[in-house]
Image: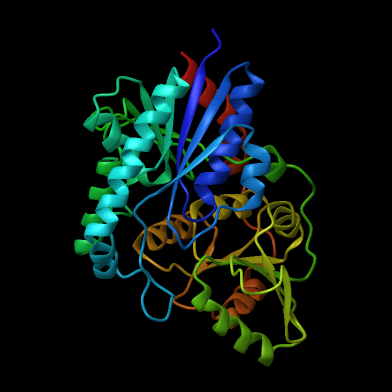
Amino acid sequence: MNMRYLFSIQGEGRGHLTQALSLAAMLRRHGHQVVGVLVGRSSVRRLPDFFFERIGAPVTEFEAPRFAFDHANRSVSMLRTLLLNAAPARLAAYDRSMRLIRDRIAELKPDHIVNFYELLTGLALRRFAIRVPMTGVAHQFLLNHANYPYGRGRGVEGWLLRLHARMTAWGCDRLLALSFRPMEEDCRHRIRVVPPLLRREALTGDSSDGGFILGYMVNNGFADELCRWSDCHPDQRLHVFWDRRDRPETWQSGAGLTFHRLDDRLFLECMRRCRAYVTTAGFESVCEAMYHRKPMLLVPAHIEQRINAADAVASGAGIEASGFDLDRLVDYLARRGAATGDDRFRAWVDSAEERFIELLTH
């Protein structure tokens, strides 16, 4: 039976958006429809053009809770985040968003909702007693898996992150936790562990060593560090993707450093051709780098990314640092060489379509 799916997506960063693109393509290959997409985002971020071009369904944006960064725009401040999202004007905006979600569900009449870690959709289902089955899909759901070690022992921040994951799971009939590796099901928490959702275009093409370092950052405060390092190492080529709208699409800073506004095709091409990858440890791009066996320097900006980084390092992906210290990466490459990872991760990723279709359509 062909089914009608509605996607709800947390729109901060790139990861949840590309996961949705991947799953939409899988469902369509098996004869199902994605009838609409709801994206929760902040007023300070714009959705990338590639998402509108490729999702193949009408997109409805709404205002959603967001992280607040410190004064240097480098790491998340939990206190500022709480104060920002609890302000009366923000709460009123979230009320309007939940009503919009309710109205779109009534209009589109989906058979099933797939929620990519978007908080307000589950709250709307509970508040308005909407009886449409919903599956949650996110790496973050591993935080509450009984056998996942990396989110424990992290104090108040860790507790708040696990609480947020539980709140985002409200309204979900089951949770599909994206993982670097297979794990047993956690029946008590309704968590099934599944492979990363990487798009076909991220998995195709030969990998090579083009001699340059690739970087990706959502937090533009790190850019100054990279500029200073590049000025001291003009012979090392760097290609860095960011989302600054006050710069040209391609902006050269010094002899070796080029900044690119986020372009998904160009990013994936650079991923296949780079020597190594520097990132703030978002789950999706770490998986893409692991699939192409690219060594990594992981520079987490907040606790969720610190957990991702610990997990990725334990999986042999690379090294972690507190800043964009590329000297450490260069030393690591000299010791380790350019290739990393093994075929087990690739086989795990390649099994995703079969697993997701079975879990979402039966």
Where residue 340 sits, quadrant-wise, is bottom right
Where residue 250 sits, quadrant-wise, is bottom right
Q: Residue at x 61, y 79 (%)?
A: 331
Q: Is residue 210 left or right of residue 139?
A: right
Q: Residue at x 54, y 53 (%)?
A: 14
Q: Residue at x 61, y 27 (%)?
A: 26
Pick the residue in front: 182 or 258: 258
Quarter of the picture containing the N terminus is top right
Provide residue 58's location: percent of width, then percent of height: 57, 34
Rendered image coloring scheme: rainbow
Question: Does 247 appear above or below 210?
Answer: below
Question: Does 108 appear above or below 200?
Answer: above
Residue 341 visible in the picture:
no
Residue 112 visible in the picture:
yes
Provide residue 247's location: percent of width, then percent of height: 66, 74
Q: Is residue 203 left or right of residue 133?
A: right
